[in-house]
Amino acid sequence: MAKADIDTKIIELFKKNTGVFLSGEDISDILGCTRAAVWKHCEKLRDIGYDIEAVPHLGYRLKGIPDKMLPDEILYELDTVVIGQTIYTYTKTGSTNTLAYTLAEQGAPEGTVVIAEQQENGKGRLGRPWVSPPGGIYLSCIIKPTIAPNEIQEFTLVTALSVVDAVKEVTGIVPRIKWPNDIVINGKKVAGILTEMKAETDRIAFVVVGIGVNVNTAGRSLPSSATSLKEETGERVMRLDICRALIRNLDREYRSFREKGFRDARGRVIALSATIGKKVRVVSHIAVHEGTAVDIDEEGALVLKTTGDGIQRIVSGDVN
């Protein structure tokens, strides 16, 4: 048994015996190693951040796990079908989207996830930087949908549903979706989505969907237009819980999207929209549009009612 496997097995034993002391002898017998090795690995796990209590004549028990993006913790009872079967985690990296894109070009399987606790060169839409300080979750996933390139906006909105559901499950707060790719609470951005793809004229080779969530991010490190889950709840939020819920929901929504397309998700996107019903100004790379947002159509485009009861269909742009 490899050393890394022993670490994993010890944590699994603790989790299966929550609150119960396990003697060093019992652990060593189960894992087929020495008691000295058990002690050594428990010390190593403490260094990572696991709260392991040791009491003479009783043994060891797990009192708490670290709120870090550890693969074993993310994968524990994750029970997904496509997303998250392979996970790479980093304390700090340049951009998870860049890493995932490189992995996809090298043939990484669909559902591969790259996660970082901090990004030095986080990417937003239109080449803008994405502020990525410690305390957040920065996650990118490789998917290989059988859709045309012009359908990618639909999947961005499906991904937004995954983020909303994850935040709701863990905190009870129901964020809103600001078209085309932001998640907001009380009008402030708490998460963003960036989809990048490698495609030909009518065929997608792969898509990298990047998600950044401000979880316990300090307010002073965020723009004034942004917020974090900690600020909104008034307490620290377990990032592992958000991360696991996000991957599970993304797996469910993606499989539904592959089977049924955008039609099933559209109603929920509209119900959660922070844009529909508002007077907006949409700036795209070719024009500026103003009007009242009245709908999100079957292809994920924003529908505006303009002066004189005109209707304008917006495929992409920044909404204010």
Image (cartoon, rainbow, N blue to C red):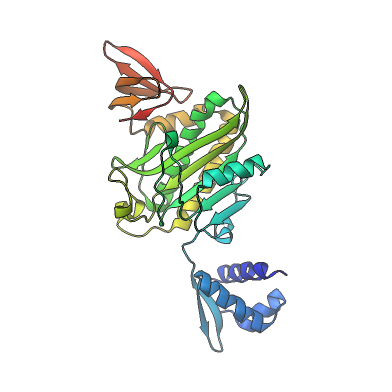
Q: Viewed as shown, does residue 156 lie left or right of 107?
A: left
Q: Viewed as shown, does residue 170 lie left or right of 56?
A: left
Q: How many marks?
A: 0
Q: Viewed as shown, does residue 167 lie left or right of 244?
A: left
Q: Nearer the viewer, residue 249 or 42?
A: 42
Where residue 132 appears, x then y in whole percent?
41, 50
Q: Is residue 254 visible?
A: yes
* Residue at the image point whose x is 38% and y is 24% from the top: 284
Which quadrant holds residue 89? bottom right
Where residue 319 appears, x then y in whole percent?
34, 29
Considering every residue shown, the one lying at the far bottom of the view is 57
* Residue at the image point whose x is 34% and y is 22% from the top: 294
* Residue at the image point whose x is 48% and y is 57% from the top: 240
* Residue at the image point whose x is 41% and y is 38% from the top: 128
Q: Nearer the viewer, residue 209 or 52?
A: 209
Q: Viewed as shown, does residue 44 lie left or right of 310?
A: right
Q: Nearer the viewer, residue 68 or 51?
A: 68
Figure check: 175 above or below 136 = above
Where residue 292 appears, x then y in whole percent?
29, 22
Figure check: 269 above or below 115 = above
Q: Is residue 77 visible?
A: no
Q: Which quarter of the image is occupied by the C terminus?
A: top left
Figure check: 73 above or below 279 = below
Where residue 110 appears, x then y in whole percent?
64, 41
Q: Which quarter of the image is occupied by the N terminus?
A: bottom right
